[in-house]
Amino acid sequence: MKKSFLSLCCFLLTVSFAQAQDDPGKLAKQAGRALTSYNIDPSNNGSKLEEAKSKIDQALNDAEVQANPASWITKGEIYNTILQRDMARRMIDTSARLSGDNDALVAYNAFAKGYELATKSYQKSDAVKGIGELQGHLINIGVSKYEGGSFEKAFLSFEAALKSHKILSENNSRSLLDEPEQYNNQLYITALAAQLADKMDLAEKYFKQSYDANTDKPAVYEGLYNVYMGKGDTAAAEKVLSEGRAKFQNDPGLLFAEINAYLQKGKLEDLISRLEQAIKQEPTNVSLWVTLGSVYDNLHQREMKANNEEKAAEYFEKAKSNYEEAQKVDPKNVDAVYSLGALIFNKAAVRTQELNALPQDDFSPAALKKYEKLRDEIIALFNQALPYFQKAESLNPNDLNTLIALSEIYAREDDLEKANEFKKRMEVVKDGGQNASSYFKN
């Protein structure tokens, strides 16, 4: 009986001890003591840091501990120490990985919460000190996340860096973002990361801060324009783009944004001067030459339909000239090669419609002469277009438009073998397949 009683007492004592060990408030204090032990002798007390991390995380699951600013500051100090340890390892081995995904952000959030709840001046001071130590790491880890394509994580780190600047400034402490240029750069990269993470409201918030401060960064106007377009607010987007273009007339980003806007609206004449300006700035940009050629190509087709022969001929030559310039820049640019062939082919197609519209029962010498002249012009145009399509096919054997054009031209020439060959290749692409190699060799 006595033995059973003693066993029961031992059991109760064990349970009571375990409960005391798991008391959240005591766990928080134990975490602080474990951190102190680590700081006294990091070499021999390495396990104490992990113990501190485990205990503070467990303690902060409790609502009462969460209301205590000291607990949050302790967490910030623990995670900050983990980060400092990892950084020290990196100085020895640059390939060493951080133990956490972003301990700087975890530490910042803890310090920020401690700062918010602080009731004593030394608590605020400790939180501010910790935030100051973390700011550079927040920026650097954010850059690493950004470069790795983790835009949401980059944004959170960048935003924390901006928030840290506000807290540090309010407490007359040095911030890495004290210089206006540094602060504005951080605003921009934070907004850009938010945009790339599809957080459009937050991207707008940070782009707008720079915009309202009359930024000298054209990229801010471009970014805000893209955000408004992404949100479907075309009126706000056009306003920002117009202001940006007026303020930064030679900025290529804004210029290209305006070019794309005019392309979408079909403002062909307005595009010409913008594209010419862009070409002056980037004369080796093949896409600009092709786009300008396409603008003149569309104008040529418009004037052809309106029977304005003289104007159509003028636009045809300008389109041809720009496509040829594109080929000079890059002889193997398939868009430039195909576009030149298509320009000539389409003119031949229009002439073919004119030929078919001629009276079929007029056999007068004048009518026959007109018929033969038009027929010869059509044959000559198709012959001019053919080499461009052949080259385009050699560069890309799976472009459907090129294959269609080749099939039609060979059918007109009664070369049924080649016409059928390209018809078969067309069907392969239409069925979702790929031609293994080109018919023509470049």
Image (spheres, grey):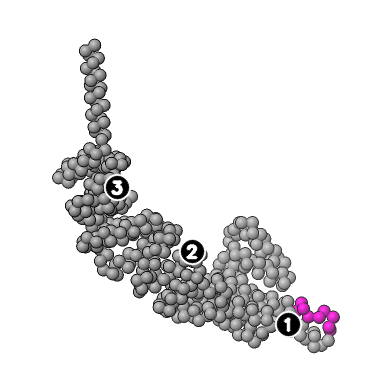
Mark 2 or mark 3, which is nearer to you? 2
> Which amino acid does the dot numbered 1 rest on?
Leu
Q: Are marks 2 and 3 in contact (CB under 8 Å)?
A: no
Local crowd size for mark 2, using a 10 Å CA cut-off: few (<14), some (14–19), many (≥20): some
Residue at mark 3 to residue at mark 1: CA–CA distance: 77 Å
* Residue 303 visible (yes or no): yes
Q: Residue at x 60, y 77 (%)?
A: 298
In the visual, does 21 lie left or right of 255? left
Q: Secondary structure at mark 1?
A: helix
Location of residue 297 (image quadrant): bottom right
Local crowd size for mark 3, using a 10 Å CA cut-off: few (<14), some (14–19), many (≥20): few
> Which amino acid does the dot numbered 2 rest on?
Gly
Q: Which mark is residue 374?
A: 1
Q: Residue at x 23, y 20 (%)?
A: 9
Mark 3 or mark 1, which is nearer to you? 3
Nearest to N terminus: mark 3 or mark 1: 3
Q: Residue at x 76, y 83 (%)?
A: 372
Residue 103 % position (x, y): 29, 50
Residue 32 % position (x, y): 20, 43
Query: As drawn, which residue projects farthest toward the front?
Result: 119
Query: As drawn, which residue projects farthest toward the left?
Result: 40
Query: Up-down: is 289 above or below 191?
Result: below
Query: Which residue position holds label 2?
Result: 230
In the image, 302 versus 22, the foreground residue is: 22
Q: Which mark is residue 99?
A: 3
In the visual, does 192 lie left or right of 306? left
- Which residues fall within the magenta stretch? 355-363
> Which amino acid does the dot numbered 3 rest on?
Ser
Which image quadrant: the C terminus? Answer: bottom right
Q: Secondary structure at mark 3?
A: loop
Residue 221 lies in the magenta-colored region: no
Q: Residue at x 29, y 47 (%)?
A: 99
